[in-house]
Amino acid sequence: MLLTLRVAFVPFVVAFCFGPTRNQQGSEGIAGLRWNRMPPNPILLYDGVCGLCNRLVQFTLRHDRRDLFRFASLQSPLAARILERHGASAANLDTFYVVAHHQQPDEQLIARSDAVAYVLRELGGRWQVCGIFWKLLPPMIRDALYNLIARNRYKIFGKLDTCPLPDLQQRHKFLDK
């Protein structure tokens, strides 16, 4: 009898001590409490035919130890829908975006140099430090550097004929099927 009570009581103790809260989002958990959900993976929106952008994607894939980021080219229907929702144009291929909290009430579209800082900070480790220092630069300087590189990216890094296909192990991270 005592063992039965202990076993039945364990889920309530776990629920009380390890994270369920009464919040606005989440699924019903034990005793009507709501469990916090992890926010959706940030989505990087990039120019799929830009050599620099594709190198950035490959860099992010290599250093994303937490399997955090997902990717979609600016030429995809998904990117067009997201950008339209935020009043931005998919035709503006010189802008790199991060979509944080995708399809949540607090969804954010982070653009240009702020998007670079976001990615670096989320990669963690030494990249996080680089992202913090990048973000400490005045926005006018960051944006000027970003715009200079964006204007000349095809000349410096080339332009691809098509978006390269990711390898099979990484394909699930690409949302523009």
Image (tube, grey):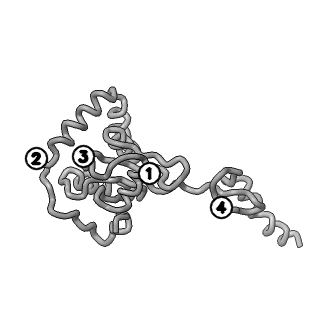
Q: Please indicate whether residue 89 sits to the left or right of residue 144 in the image.
A: right
Which quarter of the figure is the C terminus placed in? bottom left
- Give the x, y percent position of residue 68: 42, 56
Within 10 Å of disc 2 (Cα), the crowding (few <14, some 14-19, many 20+) is few
Mark 4 to mark 1 CA distance (whole Å):
26 Å
Q: Residue at x 35, y 58 (%)?
A: 71
Q: Are marks 2 and 4 in contact (CB under 8 Å)?
A: no
Residue 5, above or below 84: below
Mark 2 to mark 3 CA distance (whole Å):
13 Å
Question: What secondary structure is found at the residue carrying circle 4?
Answer: strand
Mark 1 to mark 3 CA distance (whole Å):
19 Å
State the residue in front, 44 or 36: 44
Residue assigned mark 1:
85
Q: Earlier in the sequence, mark 3 or mark 4?
A: 4
Residue assigned mark 2:
155
Mark 1 to mark 2 CA distance (whole Å):
31 Å
Q: Residue at x 18, y 41 (%)?
A: 151
Look at label 1 and name its amino acid: Arg
Q: Is residue 2 visible?
A: yes
Q: Please indicate whether residue 100 sits to the left or right of residue 127 in the image.
A: right
Residue assigned mark 3:
94
Residue assigned mark 4:
27
Q: Earlier in the sequence, mark 2 or mark 3?
A: 3
Look at label 2 and name its amino acid: Lys
